[in-house]
Image (cartoon, rainbow, N blue to C red):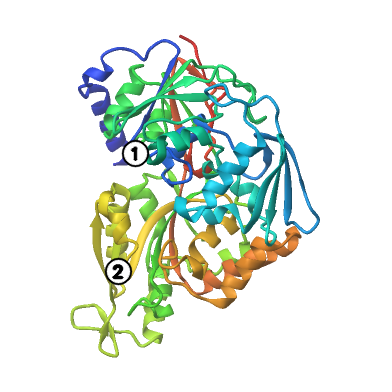
Amino acid sequence: MKRMLGAALLALSVAAPVADTWAQPAPRNTLVILREIDADRFDPHRTTARSAGESLYMMSDTLVSLDFDMRTIRPGLAERWDVSEDGRLYTFHLRRDVTFCDGRPMTAQDVVYSINRWIDPATRSPVRWRAGPVKEVRAKDDHTVEYELNEPFGELLYQLTLFFASVVDRNAVERLGDNFGVQGFNGTGPYCWVSWTPRQELVLQRHPNYSWGPPIYQNPRPQVERVIWRIVPESQTRIAALQTGQADITQYIPHIAIPQMRQMPNVRMSTQENYFWDYFLGFKVDKPVVSDPAIRRAVNQAVNREAIVRAVFFGQAQPADAYLNPNVEGFDAEAAKLVPRFDPDAARRTLDEAGWRMGPDNVRVKDGQRASFLVYAINTQIARQSLEAIQADLRRVGIEMRIQLWDATVGWGRLATQEFDAFTMSYPYVTATDAFSLYFDSQNRPTPNRMNWADPATDEALRKARTAVDPEVRQRAIAEAQRIIASNYVWLPIARDQIWVASSQRVEGVRAHGIYGVGLYKGLDIRLTR
């Protein structure tokens, strides 16, 4: 059945009418990249959208970079760095050949301005915590930055690889004000802002001076003259444009089409084994019904993750048998063993032993409370189909899950409320401490800690993991946090997604990266043959 559906989709994509925009092949020496949705803005300190990060990695740089193994920190704007023995002072030694797109040399003062803007409460950055417990960031001279912390933050270098830590031009920020990243941008990246037409395309031009790309690339300079990030919501149109040479690259490939596209002679496919993007269902642990650990345990036992991966992801993901990808820095194998495996009979026993008796409508009841809860989600195909499968599995053991889907324009606001009992979403991460600090620290309630999980032992384990200078101490602490969460069944892990980047015949040098879900990162090795 899956093979038939995949063949049908691809046949339809080839036959689908192509809009006037696609009437001609992709322009010479212009890379046309397709994505599904646009960003809200291209200000690294004020957006968390992956679609923003995709372009910001091309328009700007960070002090350090992340290798393809998702573990190794490599040079970026800083050619080297020193860390004090107590882990509180990082000294970054900057390259001396870096310029902004307007030609102005970048100095340590630009780095200081950018970090301070990121953490300034007035900026209202939703991710300023990623900069760590900053005491002061100062320029020792034009090419040396001292980054001083109030306490050690072992995650700092990882966090500084993310696009939120991009260095921006103060002059452009002050000139454009709230429209920085909307009407213009001036960075040090391999490509420079030309124009943005929201919901249509972002156009970038090669930075003529750029020669300081991260050492993870063979080429420190951009190989393409012009880049167009084009918005194409319809998956069939994206595939058709790629197959016919009217576009060059996309990572937004429907799961059903991946096996067939891997066999196509006119399409190249690249993947990344160390890609960390997971789907889960989280419980508000202080709400009726789901406050009972037995309910949460039974949900984990009742849901067939493998079936969801086959039916919803068409086998192009991995069932999530743990809270984290085993390849991530800080993963604890013992915590993974605490996640219940699929066993519907065990789920029924769990509920029976906890006093949840089957009611006349085949929904269990305890102390007059029906085993029923409400789940919220953004309305996507994956969320809709996953929740329907979970709903059916739970019904078989006597649990009723009610589903409320929201359009993305209002959904994020709804997910910041206390109206629901559970929710589902997906997220990227770079380390175990990164993921767990984001979601399980009590200070992050009500969002992104939408579970309202407030546990002193978890907070203390996360604090130790973030502040430990000794890697072994850090590992023990983050392992402890994982074991606490897993033993309390705070989530139902669902699936670990894979990343695939598809490119047309005229494109060479594409290698999927995956940082924060971004396939191309800076794309410096990408070149066009015609």
Q: Which mark is residue 420?
A: 2
Residue matched to label 1: 256
**Sequence-first tag of 2 and 1:** 1
Q: Where does the N terminus fall, quadrant-wise?
A: top left
Q: Quadrant of residue 129?
A: bottom right
The residue type indicated by label 2 comes to Phe
**Image coords of residue 63 (percent x, y):** 64, 39
How many circles with numbers are drawn on the protein?
Answer: 2
Position of 30 with respect to 110 (left or right) is left
**Image coords of residue 300 (percent x, y):** 42, 68
**Image coords of residue 39 (percent x, y):** 36, 39
Up-down relation of residue 467 to residue 40 (above or below):
below
* Camera-side residue of 342 and 184: 184
| Residue beneath the point at 24% across and 57% down | 405
The residue type indicated by label 1 comes to Ile
What whole-number distance in Å separates the C-alpha atoms at marks 2 and 1?
Answer: 31 Å
Up-down relation of residue 296 to residue 111 (above or below):
below
| Residue occupying the far right of the picture | 85
